[in-house]
Image (cartoon, rainbow, N blue to C red):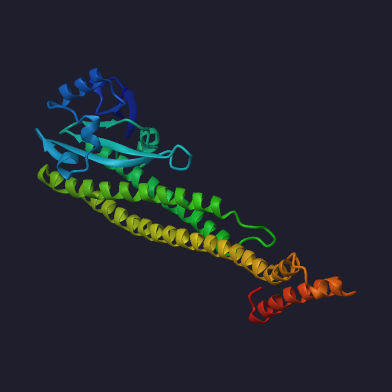
Amino acid sequence: MITGYALKDGGLAREEPEGAIWLDFFDPTDAERDALSAMIGFPAPTRVQQAEIEMSSRLYVERGAAVMTALIPAHTKTDQAEIGPVTFILAEDRLFTLRTHTPRPFETYPAEAAQHAHPCDSALAILLGLIEDTISRLADLVEYVGRKIESLTKSVFRPERGKRPDLQARLQKIGWRDSIVTHVRDSLVTIERMLGFLQPVLEQRDAPKAALALLASHQRDVRTISEQAGFLMQKTAFLLDATLGLISIEQNAITKMFSIVAVVFLPPTLVASVYGMNFEFMPELGAPFGYPLALLLMALSAAGPLFWFRRRGWF
């Protein structure tokens, strides 16, 4: 699907592809990809090329157009969270975007472009606006995940009284939060590289100083958010280790309980086994109080280990 946007009243409005300054190619067909190649004058990146991790495949200049691919997450607060490549192609007077998923900024920025502090008056301004919205979304996501991780921390180390914590469910939540933070970190790394690549390109094009200043501001924001995302990754790793440790402690407590029970019942079993033998000469069998004495002996042999364990503080 191809969606075109033109400049209007300091913002963006839908426009036919022929007169659009920004063309967004969402999950394009082969024919639409061929149309993009004809517009930019060279083959558009394929899905395989977009997924490649080499810098030379993600960031390059072709016939004066800067081709930049970054990983951007989508649906991050739902069970359908994903991350995928988005390619930005900045020509002299037009911007082309190529994607196969729906990051939130591509849905909100066209309607909010006129409200940005920086004027939306060129293809470069649209690109910087999209990047700004993306960085803002990533910052919000880091704050959101940070709150969730803090809540998990309290539930792990300060569970509600009278309730047995479901450590398995918490493990799943920790793993899910960690995957979201990993998506954010991967996205920030690719965006930071893209901004670093874009800076000399804009300098060669004699871009306005305001655009270069905005680009530098974006780079600082990305570094700040990356540091916070790195801290959250360390925190989720600590939570994961702590939860696994609590599970191990719980399993050890169960094993310890069964071990104590086994040791307690071992001496009575020995006594019962002795008097269960079918020997012909066993004087105790004929004693009037043989049976009660045997029971008393079994009780004392069980009480002995219990007393010992109690003194050692094992239960």
- The answer to whether any part of residue 278 appears in the image is yes
Compared with residue 27, is residue 65 higher up or lower down, i.e. above or below? below
Q: Residue furthest top?
A: 31
- Is residue 177 rendered to the left or right of residue 286? left
- The answer to whether any part of residue 207 appears in the image is no
Which image quadrant: the N terminus? top left
Q: Name the residue located 63 percent from the left edge and 75 percent from the top edge.
A: 314
Compared with residue 314, is residue 104 higher up or lower down, i.e. above or below? above
Compared with residue 290, is residue 42 higher up or lower down, i.e. above or below? above
Q: Residue furthest right?
A: 288
Q: Nearer the viewer, residue 119 or 187?
A: 187
Q: Residue 208 at x, y = what percent?
A: 18, 45
Q: Nearer the viewer, residue 278 or 306?
A: 278
Q: Residue 242 at x, y = what percent?
A: 49, 63
- Is residue 124 rendered to the left or right of residue 310? left
Q: Name the residue located 44 percent from the left edge and 58 percent from the top edge.
A: 236
Q: Name the residue located 23 percent from the left edge and 32 percent from the top edge.
A: 48
Q: Residue 305 at x, y = what percent?
A: 68, 76
Q: Nearer the viewer, residue 111 or 168?
A: 168
Which image quadrant: the C terminus? bottom right
* Numbered label tally: 0
> Which corner quadrant of the image does residue 274 belong to?
bottom right
Q: Nearer the viewer, residue 234 or 65?
A: 234
